Amino acid sequence: MMWAACELRGPAGLGKVTFARETIEADLAGAILKRMEWRENPEEEGVLVASYGERLGAVWEEEDGFWGYQVDSRPGGLADTEADAKRACAVEIASMSKPTSKAK
């Protein structure tokens, strides 16, 4: 997303415009999710894993039918579906990323 901060000069003039680009976390999570290639974990049956850079997400089905997820062995959570668990991993990875705001 692009936005501009404007500084007024006097009652009718525009003194300075600063343009900035910012990535919205939801957009970043969607982009991350598209790049994650999920595969069966050879070390743990029933666990799907995918990496994004140095981050590793994992999802698995719990006995009660919910889906567990985590990123980088940090405590994760539960989701209603496999797709929701994968998206939760992408959101977690996005939240770990540094903000990308650049003023021009």
Image (cartoon, helix red, strand yellow):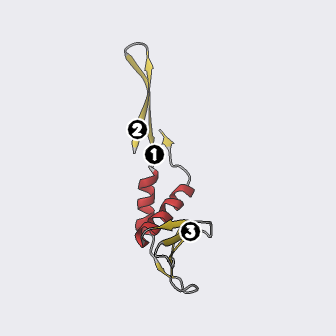
Q: Earlier in the sequence, mark 1 or mark 2?
A: 2
Q: Nearer the observer, disc 2 or disc 3? A: 3
Q: Amino acid at mark 2?
A: Trp
Q: Pinpoint residue 84: horizontal percent, then vertical percent.
A: 43, 66
Instruction: Tell me the SS state at disc 3.
Output: strand
What is the distance, in whole Å, between disc 1 and disc 2 at their CAs?
8 Å
What is the distance, in whole Å, between disc 2 and disc 3 at their CAs?
34 Å
- The residue that disc 1 covers is 22
- The residue that disc 2 covers is 3
- The residue that disc 3 covers is 70
The residue lying toward the viewer, choosing from 45 and 94, is 45
> Mark 1 Cα within 10 Å, few/some/many (few <14, many 20+)?
few
Q: Are marks 1 and 2 in contact (CB under 8 Å)?
A: yes
Q: Earlier in the sequence, mark 2 or mark 3?
A: 2
Q: Pinpoint residue 30: horizontal percent, then vertical percent.
A: 41, 60
Q: Pinpoint residue 32: horizontal percent, then vertical percent.
A: 45, 63
Taking the spot 50% from the left edge, 43% from the top edge, the residue there is: 102
